[in-house]
Image (cartoon, rainbow, N blue to C red):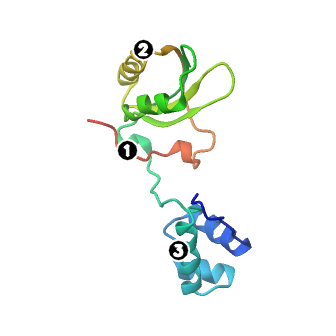
Amino acid sequence: MSSRTASFDELDRKIITALMANARTSFAEIGAAIGLSATAVKRRVDRLRETGVITGFTATVEPSALGWLTEAYVEVYCEGAAPPRRLAEVVRNHPEITAAMTVTGAADALLHVRARDVDHFEEVLERIRTVPFIRKTISVMVLSHLIPDSPEAGATQAAPE
C-alpha cells in the first residue's frame, strides 16, 4: 500500500468483495447492489487503486488450457542465511514459478511451480538446484484442487515456449 493511510468503510469492503468475485462487474451493477450510483462506485474504486488497496485486475484461466499440466510446491533449503532479495532474484529467472514466499519452519522458502509435464518440472527443479546457495529441495506434486475456484487453482501466465 502507499504511504498514505488506506482507510475504507463498509461500502468500500462491499465494492472490493464484488470486484474480487468478478472484476468485470460494472460500477452500475455494484452500485445497485450496495445503494450507490455508478459514479460514486467509480470514485471509490479510483481512490482504492490510488491508495494501493486495489493493486490490479486479472483474469483467472484454467491452467491446462495454457499448457500447464503439472503443478507442485517446492520447499527450498538454503546454505546459511539466504536473504529474501537473493531468493527473489532466483525465482524471477524461472517463469514456471508462479508464486514464491519465505516461510517459517525448516524450509527457507516455498515455491509454487507449474510446468508442461513431469519432464519439464524435473528440468525446472534441476535449474533451481544449480543455484550455489540452495542446499536441497523437497517437492510435493498437486493431484487435485479441493477448492477449484481458489486463486491457486488458476493460472496467470501462459506456459513458456
Which is more toward the observer, 14 or 86? 86
* Picture residue at 44% right of the left edge, 50% below the top: 61
Q: Nearer the viewer, mark 3 or mark 2?
A: 2
Q: Nearer the viewer, mark 1 or mark 3?
A: 3
Residue found farthest to the front: 3
Q: Mark 2 points at which residue?
A: 132
How crowded is the residue under tag 3: few (<14 C-alpha within 10 Å), some, or many (20+)?
few
Which is more toward the observer, 98 or 84? 84
Q: Left of 157 or right of it: where is 18? A: right
**In the rendered structure, which amino acid carries the disc numbered 3?**
Asp
**In the rendered structure, which amino acid carries the disc numbered 2?**
Pro
x, y percentage for residue 129?
43, 16
Q: Mark 1 points at which residue?
A: 65
Which of the two labelled residues, at mark 1 and mark 3, occupies the earlier sequence position? Answer: 3
Q: Distance between the residues labelled 3 and 2?
A: 45 Å
Q: Name the residue under label 3.
A: 46
**In the rendered structure, which amino acid carries the disc numbered 1?**
Ala
